[in-house]
Amino acid sequence: AAGVIQSPRHLIKEKRETATLKCYPIPRHDTVYWYQQGPGQDPQFLISFYEKMQSDKGSIPDRFSAQQFSDYHSELNMSSLELGDSALYFCASSGPKETQYFGPGTRLLVL
Amino acid sequence: AQSVSQHNHHVILSEAASLELGCNYSYGGTVNLFWYVQYPGQHLQLLLKYFSGDPLVKGIKGFEAEFIKSKFSFNLRKPSVQWSDTAEYFCALRTGGYNKLIFGAGTRLAVHP
């Protein structure tokens, strides 16, 4: 069965640079969620989209923005990167009131 | 605010031992509850979920969990663990169909052969 696809899988950036993470949900899933998992931490919700509209917002810094496109894929844009942004970024997708299925994550390292 | 508490941060067991990981949540309304597993270097995978109905739910790989509403608990169990169960286990709560997941801090399980 098709799963959630994330790209890139690994990303190395310098401080103050920008990064764009992409998420392709499972086909026919209309909701995308972004989570950040710091080293040794539990995943923390950042933001979600339903039918291309932002549906909920968590602890997402103002330096980050995200959107969901007409084909339901989503992008997380991160600017002015800081060392503390180094983490694993997971995308999850779900259908109507269904379980969230997670992608493999993008491991971001900020130097 | 909703929250999830996992009491054991690290658990070490020998193969064939029985496992029970505690999970308690804080929320007064209807909840959906999940257990996810994260193998080393991998993404979160769904073990099992509870939406409604029979409070004893069975998941993959021989895991099961019991929802006890009066205790706000959703403990994960497995009668006999294997070395391959070494992973981190996260309990998660959702308060509505499209809502975000709220995770517990996770329990790191190490199973020795």
Image (cartoon, coloured by chain):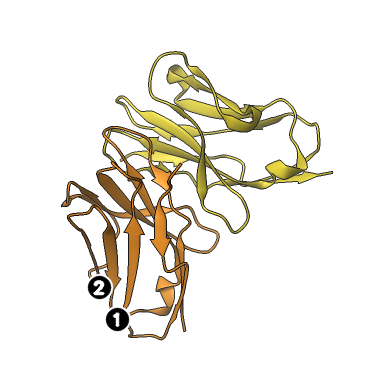
Chain colours: A orange, B yellow
Percent x, y of residue A67: 21, 60
Type of amino acid at the residue the image marks with label 2: Arg
Percent x, y of residue B66: 53, 21
Name the residue carrying label 1. Answer: A80
Give the residue displayed 48% in from the left and 19% down from the top.
B68
Chain assignment, label 2:
A
Name the residue carrying label 2. Answer: A63
Picture disc at residue A37: none
Give the residue displayed 40% in from the left and 51% down from the top.
A4
Q: Are marks 2 and 1 in contact (CB under 8 Å)?
A: yes
Viewer-nearest residue: A23 or A18? A23
Q: Is residue A50 above or below residue A71?
A: above
Viewer-nearest residue: A69 or B47? A69
Q: Give the secondary structure at mark 2.
A: loop
Give the residue displayed 28% in from the left and 64% down from the top.
A75
> N-terminal of the two: label 2 or label 1?
2
Residue B30 falls in which quadrant of the image?
A: top left
